[in-house]
Image (tube, grey):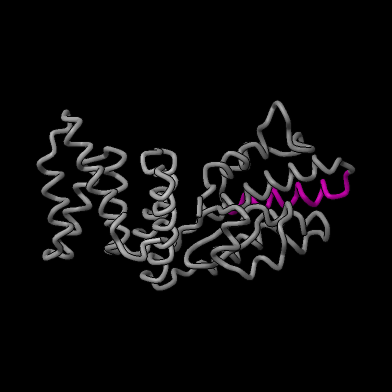
């Protein structure tokens, strides 16, 4: 599972400020009023109500749905204080909630807004519906509902779900010998950070994140997590060994750094049923 947050954030900005390939009828949008507040969605409703009667090419409509839906989703993400919303591509959304498959993959479902363990909604689909059916599909109302329903699920369940996805990605990276690929590691760490937002003491997430930070050579951050693990599970020998390795590390010594990374990889390779 790969979060698409940065990508959709970029699309949301293009909704109202693309000079090279502007959104259809972009000149009707008052960019200064689109500040990612919930209230700004009233302006989006007004824009959609006006533009839905216009004639445009299929590509222009698709571009508008993508960008406008991204903006609506970003408003929800940025204004939610109870759960961590993230963007997923369609295929990953189906993995976390298989019932989504019945909708099929389309411009309205190509990206989904998600929070753990399996709540999914489609801001792009809401734009598509508004354009087809009118103002009864208000994006302001949609966002209000999604924000009011965003009640934190039992934290251990959410944390464990996110951890399982992160663990699977890391296991696949080790299988493919891509464990030193920074992009893959950076694609996995947000899952663990979100898990720890749900449950700050989730030991599996703390453990894996500390080891990914070692692979990123973020040794001080890794050490902080290991200290926390030691406080939670003081008798755990793996935490103790990891602490000793980090505290005795000479960062200028390539061989020591290499041995530490090898220890991390060997630990994961020897775990039974880890993938």
Could you tell me which residue is drawn at 55 percent across and 52 percent down?
87
Instruction: Look at the image and give the residue range highlighted in magenta.
Output: 38-54
Please state the horizontal and vertical placement of residue 26, each as a whole percent of the image: 75, 36
Task: Kindly give the residue lying farthest to the bottom in the view shown.
Answer: 154
Instruction: Mark yes or no: residue 202 visible.
Output: yes
Q: Is residue 246 above or below residue 82?
A: above
Q: Which quadrant of the rendered structure holds the C terminus?
A: bottom left
State whether the magenta stretch is mostly helix, strand or loop. Answer: helix
Quarter assignment of residue 19? top right
Q: Is residue 117 above or below residue 240?
A: below
Residue 6 appears left or right of 12? left
Please state the horizontal and vertical placement of residue 1, each as a whole percent of the image: 50, 55
Please state the horizontal and vertical placement of residue 259, each as a whole percent of the image: 20, 40
Could you tell me which residue is drawn at 14 percent across and 50 percent down?
243
Could you tell me which residue is drawn at 80 percent across and 52 percent down?
49
Q: Is residue 206 above or below residue 119?
A: above
Q: Foreground: 264 or 220?
A: 264
Residue 235 appears left or right of 63? left
Please state the horizontal and vertical placement of residue 15, each as a whole percent of the image: 67, 40
Judge whether residue 46 is colored magenta: yes
């Amino acid at each position: 599972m790969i979060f698409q947050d940065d990508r959709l954030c970029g699309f949301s900005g293009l909704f109202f400020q693309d000079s090279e390939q502007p959104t259809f009828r972009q000149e009707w949008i008052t960019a200064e009023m689109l500040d990612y507040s919930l209230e700004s969605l009233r302006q989006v409703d007004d824009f959609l109500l006006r533009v839905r009667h216009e004639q445009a090419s299929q590509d222009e409509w698709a571009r508008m749905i993508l960008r406008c839906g991204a903006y609506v989703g970003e408003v929800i993400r940025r204004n939610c204080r109870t759960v961590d919303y993230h963007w997923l591509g369609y295929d990953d959304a189906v993995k976390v909630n298989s019932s989504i498959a019945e909708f099929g993959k389309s411009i309205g479902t190509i990206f989904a807004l998600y929070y753990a363990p399996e709540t999914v909604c489609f801001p792009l689909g809401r734009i598509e519906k508004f354009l087809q059916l009118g103002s009864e599909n208000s994006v302001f109302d949609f966002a209000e509902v999604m924000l009011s329903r965003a009640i934190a699920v039992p934290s251990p369940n959410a944390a464990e779900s996110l951890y399982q996805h992160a663990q699977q990605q890391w296991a696949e990276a080790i299988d493919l010998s891509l464990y030193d690929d920074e992009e893959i590691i950076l694609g996995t760490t947000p899952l663990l950070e979100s898990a720890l937002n749900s449950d700050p003491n989730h030991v599996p997430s703390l453990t894996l994140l500390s080891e990914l930070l070692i692979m990123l050579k973020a040794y001080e951050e890794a050490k902080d997590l290991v200290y926390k693990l030691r406080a939670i599970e003081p008798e755990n020998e793996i935490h103790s060994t990891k602490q000793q390795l980090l505290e005795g590390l000479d960062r200028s010594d390539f061989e020591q750094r290499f041995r530490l990374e090898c220890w991390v990889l060997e630990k994961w390779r020897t775990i039974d049923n880890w993938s």
